[in-house]
Amino acid sequence: MKVVQPAYGSDNQIMESAAEWDRCLGWTFELISEDPVRREQARGRLRVTQDRRSEALYAFNEVWRDEGLSAADQAGARYIAERRRTLPDALWEFIPAESYADWAGLKYVLLYLEWEARYPDEWMASAKGWGTKHDKLDDLARAVPHLATAVIDQLVDLISLAVRREHRCEDVGYAVLARAVGGSRLRRLLLEIADDPDEGFRLRARYLLWLLDHPEASKPKASQWKAWLRSQENESAFERAEPVP
């Protein structure tokens, strides 16, 4: 049976205030705690919110099928409310790039990406969303001209984290983001990583530096990264270029 989802995006369905975001998702910052016990507790809470979201979607479909659209309004509102309380669903709002700087959900996008970078296995098990990762990295790259310096610094840190770990699906978005961010701080960090003892870290940092030095090159994509690896005459590194699922 086809699953129907309530439309998500009308004015009364989008969280606008920082207070509302924090009320729904403030606890999710425990997902990146250095304390594994606190992280596990947060993941347990996340599972509860995801279960409630799924139950609300099932209830909406039951009402929609048996009683029609008008009767589904209340069930749909419940589903939207539950989506606001979980990840990655709460991040699925459409926000124009020029509005990202004022979007109260921005810090939760950064949280979601940092979670994957720091604790990829936990992210995979609890809230994997390759499409969400792809879309939000793309959104951030387009939003860079509108973002405050403090947010740009957070993006630089995220890029650095991504370079210093195993290559993963949709990481090409970090290459696009790095080119959009640029700047002396990012370049300095990449130069440091370019001499790292870990070969994979070195190669990713050098690739990003190459992108910064060649603005005429096409938009980063997986085939470009692999071609660059071949140009370094390092077949073992090429084999490791396949993303981790």
Image (spheres, rainbow, N blue to C red):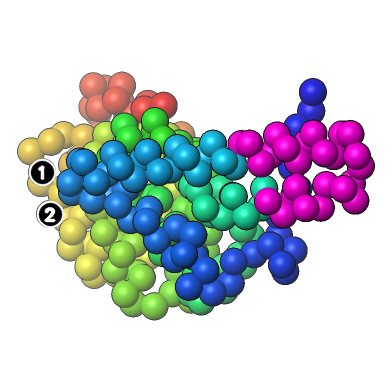
Is residue 58 highlighted in magenta?
Answer: yes
Q: Residues within 10 Å of mark 2 (few under 14, many from 20)?
A: few
Query: What numbered label is drawn on residue 155?
Result: none
Which element carries disc 2, helix, strand or loop?
Answer: helix
Q: From this view, report whether residue 182 is shown above or below residue 175.
A: below
The residue shown at (23%, 62%) is 187
Quadrant of the frame with the C terminus: top left
Residue 141 seen in render: no
Q: Name the dominant secondary structure of the magenta segment.
A: helix
Query: What numbered label is drawn on residue 192?
Result: 2
| Closer-to-camera residue (46/34) | 46
Is residue 151 highlighted in magenta?
Answer: no
The answer to whether marks 2 and 1 mark residues whose Cβ atoms lie closer than 8 Å is yes
Q: Which residues are magenta?
A: 54-78
> Horizontal and vertical percent for residue 225?
38, 38
Q: Which residue is mark 1?
A: 196
> Horizontal and vertical percent for residue 150?
31, 75
Residue type at mark 1 is: Asp
Q: Residues within 10 Å of mark 1 (few under 14, many from 20)?
A: some
From the viewer's perspective, tell me whether residue 143 is left or right of residue 115: right
Q: From this view, report whether residue 62 is shown above or below residue 155.
A: above
Residue type at mark 2 is: Glu
The residue shown at (87%, 34%) is 65
The residue shown at (37%, 56%) is 27
| Closer-to-camera residue (118/47) | 47
The residue shown at (24%, 46%) is 38
> Horizontal and vertical percent for residue 175?
39, 50
